Amino acid sequence: MELLDTARRGAATAGGRTLSAATGVLAALRPAAKPLHPDGGVTQGLLHRFGAEVASGAAWLDAVSEDQVQVRRSRAVGLPAPAPDIFGLAIRAPLPGGGYGDLLFATTGLGRLSRFTLTPARTPYTRPLTTLLPYRTRSGPVLLSAVHRSEDGLDLAWAVGTGAWRRFASLRLSQDPELSEDAPVSFDPVRNPLPGLEVYDWVSRLREPSYRTARRSRGASLDVIR
């Protein structure tokens, strides 16, 4: 087990350096824009959490609540439409004691393997999105998904590993055009986890270097990830 953990940490560290290098290349190509997810829009949404039929053991997933959230939808590479791209969905939810937590989703599939595979699409509405990397919970490694049921409505679900998806929330996005302008807001699930969704050490090793490069390219004052 110790050997496996060492190998996992080493692979995550190497992967993190590779992602950081790729982010640095994108930052150099477009110094005035975000290196990752440069094109997008920020809006408000109403998140209704009703909990799944089976408890996950993660406090935020299992709680019943209705919250105003901040949402950003974006294109990862920034290719012009209608070219296919990886679409991103970022959600910032308030915490009961103050502060906030962030979730990041990207277009993938929902199958046992495809849920872990980035998948390009022509529009953000034709593909499901997942968090791609799991969170540590009392039930085991949990992945989250978001599926559009309309242009402004999504269903959120969780699954343990490659198991069945369990719907726990719905999200309704605002259609107010005044709120759809892009903004220099930072979404960072490593720095801002939600209650009961613990970030694995190997996930931090994988993500943090590229996030740090993205922050540096845009300036510490903006601290923009997605």
Image (cartoon, grey):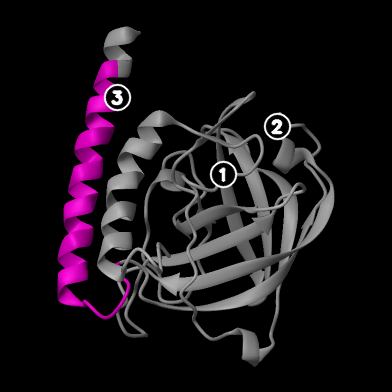
Asked if the magenta segment contains residue 14, the reply would be: yes
Element type at mark 3: helix
Point out residue 6 in the picture as x, y percentages from the top left corner: 27, 17
- Counting from the top left corner in percent of width and height, residue 110 is at 52, 49
Residue that label 1 marks: 193
Mark 1 Cα-neighbour bin, 10 Å: few <14, some 14–19, many ≥20: some
Evaluate whether residue 188 shows in this view. yes
Magenta segment's dominant SS is helix
**Residue pointed to by mark 2:** 56
In this picture, residue 78 sits left or right of residue 105: left
Query: Residue 131 at what x, y percent from top left?
Result: 49, 49
Q: Earlier in the sequence, mark 2 or mark 3?
A: 3
Please provide the residue range marked out in magenta. Answer: 6-35
Q: Is residue 219 left or right of residue 131?
A: left
Q: What residue is rendered at 70% in x and 32% in y?
A: 56
Q: What amino acid type should be assigned to the residue bearing mark 1?
A: Pro
Q: Quadrant of the C terminus?
A: bottom left
* SS type, badge 2: loop
